[in-house]
Amino acid sequence: MPRAVLLPLLAWLLLASPPSMLHAAERSVPSSEPAPGAAERIALWPAGQVPGEGAAPRAPHVIERSADPTLPDRYIDDVDAPYLVVYRPARPDGSALLVIPGGGYQRIVLDKEGTALVPALVEQGGVTLFVLRYRLPAGRSDRQAALADAQRAMRVIRAGAAQWQLDPHRIGVIGFSAGGHVAARLSTGYDLPVYPARDASDQLSARPDVALLLYPVIDMGPHAHSGSRSRLLGDHPDAALVAQFSMQQHVRPDMPPTFLVHAQDDAVVSVHNSLLYYQALTAAGVASEMHLFAHGGHGFGVRMPAALTTTQWPALALRWMRAQTQERAP
């Protein structure tokens, strides 16, 4: 068959194929998550006290999308009882990051923006990571559920600083894509009263000491990622709702220092999201640093071709984090 005919035919077959054929590698892997009660799994909320949730939470779905066991690519959804998974270095340097993975407010990516960070940030950088499984908007009227989980996570980490050998003044947040939107909401709204206090941890500050945002969703207006906006705000949000969740409009001088990373060829979340946020940060006098790379697309995490300059971001981020500590030192 001539190539000119074959290629369009193959494209049509892919589009016409049922989802089960397109995603044949997807399979449920619930046992890949730490079991409740495991040392590395920390429940965010006291049992039965997750704000707005029932007493009997659903079991979350954990799905593996990769057929390559050396490159896992799991996601999780239906999280009713949020929790953290902890990755501790052999030689902790006292710093920690709350990791908020992306997934378009539809799912939470666990490996590309979670476990894959361990070699660079934990093993080489000495940073303790707390990867958040947070509540998603589907089926919830409370649009602040993810922010409540992020605030609570920061407080729980601070409350356990001595246990995890952490400096309570060196606890930051890193967010990716829609998780970057949650991290920006935390950075700008760490003191918003979005849930009633549950225990002594809630007397602690939820302000991150630093914020790192990678290819973040920021704008809910003309530069919005349409999927994130529709899942969080609905199909036809009014102007007030769009403004409330466009994070460049809520930047404040007492925010944490912020580190931004974006690829200019990102076809999913426009680089304008980072540009808008950076402009707002500098206008407010917030210490900030932005790295724009020519190539990388969207959702690269730390899995990038070695030839791309985008591979430099973890080393740049670690150096930047350490510089913030030095600048605060007396």
Image (cartoon, helix red, strand yellow):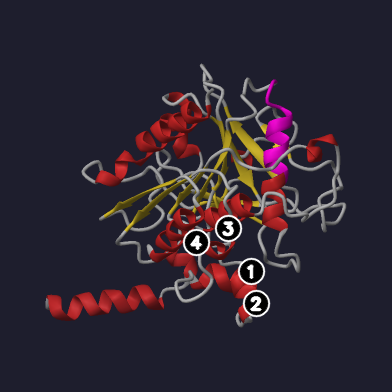
Within 10 Å of the Cα at label 2, are there few (<14), some (14-19), or many (20+) other Cα atoms? few
Amino acid type, residue under disc 4 in the picture: Val
Instruction: Label 1: state its secondary structure.
Output: helix
Is residue 270 in view from this perspective? no
User: Is 302 above or below relative to 102?
Assistant: above
Amino acid type, residue under disc 3 in the picture: Arg
Locate residue 33 relative to residue 120 in the image: left or right. Answer: right
Main structural element of the magenta stretch: helix, strand or loop? helix
Q: How many marks?
A: 4
Residue 166 placement: quadrant: top right
Q: Which residues are magenta?
A: 152-162
Which x, y percent locates residue 86? 61, 32
Contact between marks 2 and 4 (CB within 8 A): the answer is: no
Within 10 Å of the Cα at label 4, are there few (<14), some (14-19), or many (20+) other Cα atoms? many
Residue 240 is tagged as: 2
Contact between marks 1 and 3 (CB within 8 A): the answer is: no
Amino acid type, residue under disc 2 in the picture: Ala
Residue 51 lies within the magenta run: no
Mark 2 or mark 3, earlier in chain: 3
Marks 3/4: CA–CA distance: 15 Å
Marks 1/3: CA–CA distance: 22 Å
Amino acid type, residue under disc 1 in the picture: Gln
Residue where numbered disc 3 is placed: 107
Mark 3 or mark 4, earlier in chain: 3
Taking the spot 51% from the left edge, 55% from the top edge, the residue there is 284
Residue 153 lies within the magenta run: yes
Residue 217 is tagged as: 4
Instruction: Label 2: state its secondary structure.
Output: helix
Of discs 3 and 4, which sits in the foreground?
Answer: 4
Contact between marks 4 and 1 (CB within 8 A): the answer is: no
Marks 4/1: CA–CA distance: 14 Å
Of discs 2 and 4, which sits in the foreground?
Answer: 2
